[in-house]
Amino acid sequence: MSVESLANYESWDLKMNQLPKRSHLYSLQPIGFATPTVESFTSYLQRLAAAHGVSMASLIRYKITPLFI
């Protein structure tokens, strides 16, 4: 096999990918996950707030909303 027939790659991209920050929130599994009776998003947020010992309003205001602004 001759060298001329081989593919020539200009360069390799060796940059490190940016990893997302780890969440400070617990990873709770939704009740009824992967079933037709999965819990609502509101119910999930309520359980998540209770697990952290804060109100749902505080959880949304101080942990979730800043991710979008």
Image: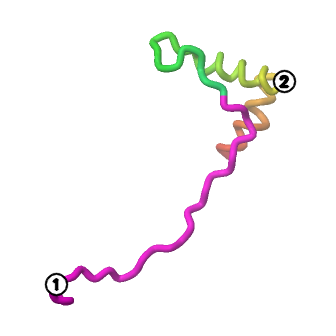
Please identify the quarter of the rendering in which residue 61 is found. top right
Secondary structure under tag 1 reads helix
Q: Residue at point 81% right, 29% down?
A: 58
**Alpha-carbon span between mark 1 and mark 2:** 66 Å
Residue 13 image offset from top left, x and y in percent = 46, 74
Task: Specify the principal SS of the magenta part.
Answer: loop
The question of residue 2 being in magenta is answered with: yes
Residue 62 image offset from top left, x and y in percent = 79, 37
User: Which stretch appears magenta?
Assistant: 1-27
Residue extending farthest top: 37
Q: Is residue 60 left or right of residue 42?
A: right
Q: Is residue 18 left or right of residue 63?
A: left
Q: Residue at point 59% right, 60% down?
A: 18
Amino acid identity at mark 2: Gly
- Few, some or many residues within 10 Å of mark 2 (<14, 14–19, 20+): few
Task: State the residue position of label 1.
Answer: 5
Residue 53 tag number: 2
Q: Residue at point 84% right, 24% down?
A: 53
